[in-house]
Amino acid sequence: MHKVIHSESIKSALAARGWTQAQLAKQLGESPQLVSLWLKGETFPSPAKLLKLATTLKLGFDKLVEPSANQPMIAFRKKAGAKTTDEHIVKARGMGELLKPLVAYLPQQQALHTLLPSPSTGYIPLQVAAAQVRAKIGIGASATLEYSHLIGEFKQNDAILVPVLWGEKQNHKNALHILLRSENVTFVYLNLDTRLEDFKFWMAHELAHVYTPGLAGTEEGEDFADAFAGALLFPQACAEQAYAQAMRARGEKGQMAVLQRHAADHSISVYTVFRETQGFAQSKGLAPLSVDEKALHALRNSQRGELVSASLFKPGPPKPQELIALTAKLFQSDFFLALQRLLNDRGGSESYVQQVLDVPLRDGLALFEVLSGAQVS
């Protein structure tokens, strides 16, 4: 099913402004004939023109485009305080369309994927789901979940990891999840310019999206992914131990020191440990910790770890060959290998590489030169 413009929404927006189709075309800088073809569903605007149409009529993407069973589903792991705009949505879905030709160059898909049929943010269902995943991976109830465990689960579920360098502050998202529904393949972009104590949580968050494709792109899906990530990384057995130790500690500072030790042991944020420990106490009807959340956040912000990119590439930034090698060897991802095969088979340009990775054109050019002229192992 191809994408078509939601003509009734546009006609209503035009009527509210007292515009004709010709006047809309003038506002867009397009011909009236082209706008007419859009409204008839005979052609579809490019991402740039679609965005201009959305901003001109002040219509959200969901009001502008007829729902399609084949359109990419997207989910953002946003930075704190960031707002997802129509421009972000249009751009991400455009990336999804560009990824479709890449699927043919990926390895054969796995026969079975892990699915969580009844996702719930309730404490007990979350703990059950986390325990099932941990048992599948083969680790105990209180063992530290390693990056290799998460990477292995992505690979087993045909989720292609795409490590990117989007900067710590320049981009509104820390991760981007694109599900190609017809192809049943997921691409997960992970921003390496992320603090070490947050990165594992964001990977677990994205894994939750892989397990619950039906919730992709919804607020319910985001809430579940956050809750599941915490339960998977610091499950009940860990929270129970942390609670017991914290309640024996002296005062708020003593409790925070206990939480910090557990956070360091699991390579996660102290806030994740705090939240999961408080959740355990509430589920058992126990007294909450005496730690003040504001004080905890202040402590966390004063002791931030280095960026993942800085720990992986010293001195940085990495050369294209280094990023390509890291993607294949550490993240067990065939993304750049498939991209190289596509470029060699079908041809392509630095513009395609730049757009499919959402990086500056100079970075797209550097990667294109390596992919089109060197072997990717």
Image (cartoon, rainbow, N blue to C red):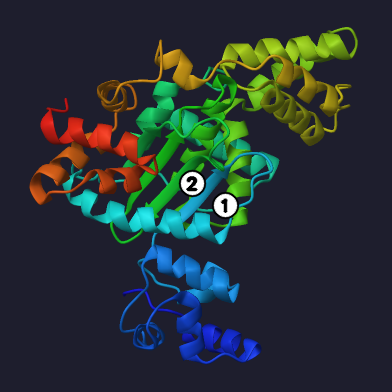
Q: Is residue 333 above or below residue 159?
A: above
Indicate the quadrant containing the C terminus: top left, top right, bottom left or bottom right: top left
Please report contact status of discs 2 and 1: CB closer than 8 Å, yes or no.
yes
Query: Between marks 2 and 1, how big is the CA–CA gap?
Result: 7 Å
Q: Is residue 351 left or right of residue 168?
A: left
Q: Is residue 174 left or right of residue 256?
A: left
Residue under circle 2? 209
Residue at the (53%, 17%) spot, across then down: 143
Indicate the quadrant containing the N terminus: top left, top right, bottom left or bottom right: bottom left
Rendered location of residue 26, percent (x, y): 47, 82
Specify few, some or many for label 1: CA neighbours under 10 Å numbering under 14, 14-19, or 20 or more: many
Q: Is residue 312 above or below residue 6?
A: above
Specify few, some or many for label 2: CA neighbours under 10 Å numbering under 14, 14-19, or 20 or more: many
**Can residue 146 be seen in this snapshot?**
no
Residue at the (33%, 34%) spot, across then down: 363
Quadrant of res 183: bottom left
Q: Does dot 2 land on a helix, a strand or a loop?
A: helix
Residue under circle 1? 221
Rendered location of residue 313, percent (x, y): 39, 15
